[in-house]
Amino acid sequence: MRTAQEIFDHHLEVFGAGNLEAILTDYDKNSVMIYGNQSWHGLEGAREFFKMWLDNLIPLGSEFELMTQLSFEHTLYITWRAESEKYKFDFGTNTFIFENDKVRWQTVGAHVTKK
């Protein structure tokens, strides 16, 4: 079984490459993603959630900086900033909780402005 760090390292690599199908290998039918006032569930929810990020918010070629990263057992927390053609994320934070070699819960919070 992979560690939380190994799962996150894979996630960061494939997200940065814009590879939706590879991202989905770290999620399953029990995964929950929360951003803003919405939540997405399961693999189809993960597909919709990451299409939103990859197609619109932070598409391939955008600037992304991982600022901090902390992990403990099955939980990993990051802060980041990013800039795409359409949006500027002055500050973002994600919390990942891992279970059975998959992302079970993921939350995203960000201060974002539309350009």
Image (cartoon, rainbow, N blue to C red):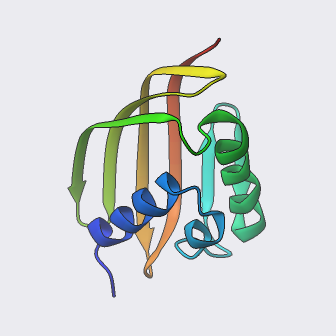
Of 34 and 54, the residue lying toward us: 54
Q: In which quadrant of the rendered image does the C terminus lie? A: top right
Q: Is residue 106 left or right of residue 5?
A: right
Where is residue 22? Give x, y as percent.
57, 72
Which residue does the image show at 27% across and 66% down from the upper left?
5
Q: In which quadrant of the rendered image does the N terminus lie? A: bottom left
Tell me the quarter of the picture where residue 46 sits: bottom right
Where is residue 110? Give x, y as percent.
51, 26
- In the image, farthest residue toward the bottom: 1
Which residue does the image show at 33% across and 42% down from the upper left?
78
Where is residue 38? Give x, y as percent.
72, 39
Of 114 and 70, the residue lying toward us: 114
Which residue does the image show at 52% across and 72% down from the upper left?
26
Which residue does the image show at 68% across and 75% down from the upper left?
29
Tell me the quarter of the picture where residue 66 sits: top left
Q: Is residue 10 left or right of residue 107?
A: left
- In the image, farthest residue toward the front: 61
Of 18 and 43, the residue lying toward us: 18
Tell me the quarter of the picture where residue 112 sits: top right
Q: How many tags in the picture?
A: 0
